Image (spheres, helix red, strand yellow):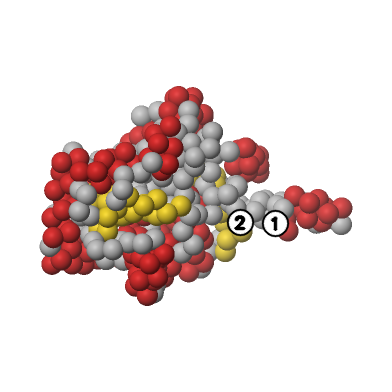
Amino acid sequence: MRVLNHLELASLLDRSGIGTATRQQRTALADAGVEVVTSPWSGGDPPTALAGRVAGEPLFERYDVAHCNLVGPGSVAVARHARRRGVPLVLHAHITREDFAESFRGSTAVAPTLGRYLRWFYSQADLVLCPSDYTRRTLESYPVEAPIRPVTNGVDLGSLSGFESLREPYRRRYDLEGTVAFAVGNVFERKGVSTFCRLAEETDDLEFAWFGPYDTGPQASRTVRRWVTDPPANVTFTGWVDDKRGAFAAGDVFCFPAKVENQGLVVLEAMACGKPVVLRDIPVFREFYADGEDCLLCSTRAEFREAVERLADDPAERERLGANARETAREHGLDRVGEELRDAYAEARRRASGDSDSGVDAGVATD
């Protein structure tokens, strides 16, 4: 099977959750024996494809399944080309109107319009993939008029190998001492930055660090600009981090009060590093994790404060939760991602052929 695994704006999304999930898909597919192309254009880009066309070469790559990971005009073009050519189309729902809100300035106002667009876009697919059953239910409520199948984003355990060696260098770089409660990823209100900072104000005997980029320009939300320009005395916003392993090494208790997530890749990465995680009690986290076993789930800021302080004072409990979390992360390894994607592509090919109930694949190729 030859699959187009496409991510438009890939260079801009390299360090985003969508970029990480796409890289993990490609690694998992390669390990599962699936041939992957990343551009629909022969030669990798339009100029090369057009030059080849003059010489009689095909304009587009040949692939048996088209899989798009974003929702912009480039993905719309790939979707239209796939539909014209009869190629099974898989659209990956990394974005919902719910998780777009409270991200950038004006994003909450735009979210309802985005929801209508996503309903139209995702409904074109032979099969929609999403990271969780929670996201499936969310999309069905729009409603998206295409079959929807949850597939874990997984976690690349190999990408975190050797993180322990970066603990002291990163703690020195950001002047961190003692037990550090930390978060990783882009700084958004949706990710819980206000809860994180107010928690720090109420827990002044601990240090808090948020590893990840943030905006202070016109596109930044007023809330994010407020916190990152005038943070509590015990909060460090690091900005861009060269090596994510350093973030997971430097922190001790992963505190992630996100309001909406489709799965939460950084949670799985923190777990893979054996960190105890403290999460907001939202449906998607209950879907994957067990309170008191591999995480602590909190509904109020008082519960967050009690959980973080308890873990700071109890190394044995940190070790217990972290060990259980590591086992949970291993259940989401890339071998599982590869198997689930192979099965999803086979389902998409059956549906595209009009044979959704049979086990016979339909081989399709573009010119």
Residue 244's place in the image compared with 229, above or below, is below
On screen, residue 89 versus residue 304, left or right, reads right
Query: Which residue lies under the disc numbered 1?
Result: 44
Is residue 297 something that shows in the picture?
no
Residue 20 at x, y percent in the picture:
47, 56
CB contact under 8 Å: marks 2 and 1: yes
Q: Give the amino acid type for the residue marked by disc 1 in the picture.
A: Gly
Q: 135 and 187: which one is in front? A: 187
Estimate the spatial distance between the alpha carbons at disc 2 and disc 1, rounded to whole Å: 8 Å
Q: 262 and 49: which one is in front? A: 262
On screen, residue 357 versus residue 86, left or right, reads left
Q: Give the amino acid type for the residue marked by disc 2 in the picture.
A: Thr
Q: Residue furthest right?
A: 54
Query: Which residue lies under the disc numbered 2?
Result: 38
**Would you identify the image quadrant in which residue 197 lies?**
top left
Residue 74's place in the image compared with 171, above or below, is above
Q: 306 and 20: which one is in front? A: 306
Label 1 crowd (10 A; few <14 / some 14-19 / many >=20): some
